[in-house]
Image: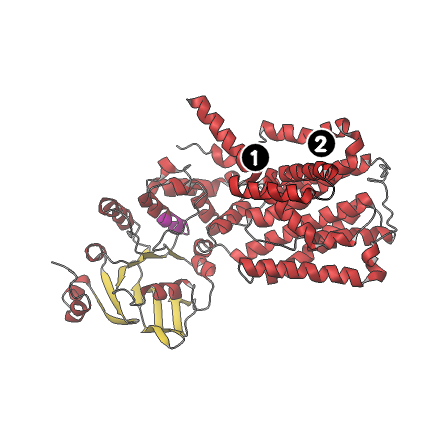
Amino acid sequence: MTYALQTTSLVKKFGGFVATNTVSLNVEAGARHALIGPNGAGKTTLINLLTGFLEPTSGEVILNGDKVTHLAQHQRVKRGLARTFQINRLFADLTVLESVVMAVNERLGLGARFWQSVGSHTAAVDEAVELLERLRLLDVAHETTRNLAYGKQRLIEIALALAAKPSVLLLDEPAAGVPTIESRELFETIAGLPREVTILLIEHDMDLVFRFADRISVLVGGAVLTEGTPEVIAHDPKVKEVYLGEAICD
Amino acid sequence: MIDLTPLTRATRWHPAELVFWLLPVAGYFLLQDNLVLLTQIAITALFCLSLDLILGFAGIVSLGHTAFFGIGAYAAGLMAAHGHGDPLLGLLVAGICAAVAGFISSLLVLRGADLTRLMVTLGVAMMLYELANKLTPITGGVDGLQGMEIQPLFGSFAFDMFGKTAYWYAVGVLFVMFVIARRLVHSPFGLSLKGIRQNVGRMPAIGAPVNARLAAVYTIGALYAGIAGALLAQTTQFVALDVLSFNRSAELLLILVLGGSGCLYGALIGTIVFMTAHHFLSDMNPEYWQFWLGLLLVLIVLFARDGVMGGVRRLGALSKGGAKA
């Protein structure tokens, strides 16, 4: 069994508070793995540990078999770990195309080129255009990001992550704040991603999780409560207890 | 297929830019009696350009940018005072000295957030000021550095008493440095700086080494400031302690805000407007001219956030809209 992303006994303490409690997560290569849990379960902290925004108190993060626990965020991106943010973190005054070209530039190692214009690096531009086409953003390529509807902006979030050609993609509530109709479309796009991209999805909308994921981990109080296939999780009494009052599945 | 010209537009010069660069030529013939002032404007414009690179494009606030201006001025001054009076060699050495200082201080400046940066830049400039003040045997202290002998430019154009050579020298250096800066801001590196300014938190997530980029632009900004300082020393053949003064840093910030930061022409136009206003206001009202300058600044920040260039852009948008209607 090959794992794209693993953690071994990952612990993060903030003072006396244990935000992440010995989490050992195994995400199979090519999986559609979902991470669920009630508010305050430590999902965001875990994402921050995986991406390198935070350093763990103890334990390791392993990406495609290599320890990356102490690598900086941008170095992990270079090794194939990209993410989107729960709340859009975009470049408000850049156009959609400029934003994506910038991200492609970084992957191709062109980000420090200071003499030729952006447009003359055609390999990066062509790739960015292709990506926009795939995400159906081509018609707004020259629009300034701040002028776009939120749903479109969510797609830019994904485009920026995909520009890194990740082997592992962390999606932090990709549909948050998007109207239901648009969120279906968004998930169709995500579902259409090639299988060699491993996806770890954090999502509140259980309906989406159970339709999308082939593996689910439930995080409660900073620790993994249980892990399994959607059927197993849906019928797990412990999970039902945690989500008391929430319809997990009908 | 989509139209990609917006990405390459910057490689061609807009006609308005060409007109703008004819101004120094016109200025030479029309304002022969004011060449000294025009030279000062060119030098300050280059200095302001350097602040624009680090503040306007990369978002690093600085209250001590004179540190690099002063280092450049003293480096060029000391070279010329000790028998190495070739102006271009002086510029080169001054630029390198300032760039090295910029790189070293970038390690401090990049540690903190905005307030820390303000204080660190201010502190570094203050230390240098007092250092230059104390090291009288080397710098001349408050009396300034004297005894500079600048050799003719390219070995054939002597610096004359009317300031003609000095003027063309300063304008020429400004133009060359501007062209380089223009390429820089339209390159992938320049784009990544805009990305850092707009959302520093996102940049690591697309794989960009933020601190390395900021250190690079800070070093380049310091190099530009050092060359501006060297120009001042060489064209006036004197270095006053004032090149390291806090006033000069603060004034520079004011000029950039006035012109519109984050736009190279903002730095240039801000300098022209400010220095011209300064010239006339201090003529009319020698004691209180700063009052009018202060008023101008308050009005600009309240009503035209993005400075003169912002106003120009809005007018341009209006006239385009009008043409469509």
For marks 2 and 1, the one nearer the N-term is 1
Q: Is residue A30 left or right of residue B230?
A: left
Residue B52, x across and y down, in percent = 60, 46
Seen from the viewer's position, the closer of residues A69 and A1 is: A69
- Residue name at image x 69 percent, y 36 percent: B276
Instruction: Assess whether residue A163 is covered by the magenta stretch.
Output: yes
Residue B240, horizontal then vertical, whole percent: 79, 52
**Residue A246 sits in quarter:** bottom left
| Residue B46 forms part of the magenta stretch | no
State left or right for residue A93 relative to residue B307: left
- Range covered by the magenta-colored residues: A157-164
The answer for how far apart the CA atoms under marks 2 and 1 are is 23 Å
Give the chain of mark 2. B
Tell me the crowding category of disc 1: few under 14, some 14 to 19, or many 20 or more residues within 10 angstroms, Cα based. some
Vertically, is B225 above or below A23?
above
The part of the image, by quadrant, that contains residue B212 is bottom right
Amino acid on which the number 1 mark rests in the picture: Thr
Q: Residues within 10 Å of mark 2 (few under 14, many from 20)?
A: some
